[in-house]
Each structure stands twice: as C-alpha cells, then as structure tokens.
Image: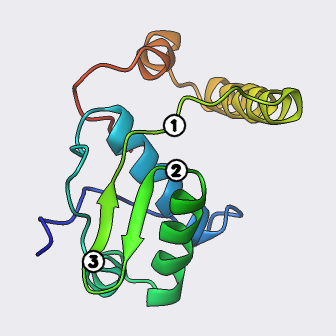
Amino acid sequence: MSSSPPTLRIDLASPVPAYRQVAEGLRALWLAGSLEVGGQLPTVRELALELGVHHNTVAEAYRLLAAEGWLELARRRGATVLVAPASPVRPAQRARVLQRLRDALAEARALGVPDAELAALLSPSKKEISP
C-alpha cells in the first residue's frame, strides 16, 4: 500500500519542532520531484519508525500538509500526494516566509555554506534536494 519511505532526516536537537521538520522535508521532496502526484506516502507508523519519532509527530506533519492542500488523508488508504493548490499568497504569509528565508540564508552564510549551493536550493530541479 505504501511506497518506500522518502529520504528524510530530522534533528531532534533543533529548536524547530520535529513535526515541522517532517512537513518541510516532505515539501522539499515534493518540490524536487521525488514524490509523485497521486503517490502514497508511507503510513504514519512506518515513517515514524524510519525517523525514530513518535507516530503523533508524523501524524501532525501529515495533518499540516493536508490542511495546506499538499496531501489527502483517508482512513485505510493513507496519505496521497496532491498537486499544491494555486491560491494567492496573503501578504502576511509572504512576509513570514520571506523572513524565514532571510534568517536561514544568514545562518547558512555564517556557517560557510557556499552561495552557489544556496542558489541551487532556490532553483529547484527534478533532482533530489539533499538535507
């Protein structure tokens, strides 16, 4: 029923909650073309075991992605990948996302991540995005 688990990594020591890391990782895999529209994600329990987290952590990530329109959740059928809806971005959402990107960019530069690598992440292709 489910495919092999996507390649995700989470950092339990990170200040970012684990469920958000899971959701962000799945979004990145989808944008990189690693998840097919209409494809099934691993069950909550399968992915939780793979990541070493509680199943409620993965369930919360799946609910978040479903609320955003990325997934369809159905009992006994699991999580199905959907096309992200093309809805207009509200100004507050846009400002929040851009600030998070600025913060991440500043952190990456402070750690010495090359600009070319950062630029490649902002220009997604069909290749997998490495965590």
Residue position for label 3: 50
Structural distance between the alpha carbons of marks 2 and 3: 24 Å
Which quadrant of the rendered structure holds the C terminus?
A: top left
Secondary structure at badge 3 equals helix
Q: Position of residue 5 (x, y in %)?
A: 20, 65
Q: Position of residue 8 (x, y in %)?
A: 34, 58
Q: Using the image as rendered, state which of residue 29 and residue 93 is in the foreground.
A: 93
N-terminal label among 1 and 2: 2
Structural distance between the alpha carbons of marks 1 and 3: 29 Å
Q: Using the image as rendered, state which of residue 109 and residue 131 is in the foreground.
A: 131
Q: Nearer the viewer, mark 2 or mark 3?
A: 2
The answer to whether residue 54 is seen in the rendering is no
In this rendering, position of residue 22 left or right of residue 109: left
- Label at residue 69: 2
- Under mark 2, the amino acid is Gly
Q: Using the image as rendered, state which of residue 6 and residue 92 is in the foreground.
A: 92
48 vs 105: above or below: below
Residue drawn at the location 46% of the way across and 39% of the way down: 84
Secondary structure at badge 1 equals loop
Q: Using the image as rendered, state which of residue 118 and residue 45 is in the foreground.
A: 45
Bin the neighbour count of mark 2 within 10 Å (Cα to Cα): few under 14, some 14-19, many 20 and up: some
- CB atoms of marks 1 and 2 within 8 Å: yes
Residue drawn at the location 35% of the way across and 81% of the way down: 44
Secondary structure at badge 2 equals loop
Structural distance between the alpha carbons of marks 1 and 2: 6 Å
- Under mark 1, the amino acid is Pro
Residue position for label 1: 85
Bin the neighbour count of mark 1 within 10 Å (Cα to Cα): few under 14, some 14-19, many 20 and up: few
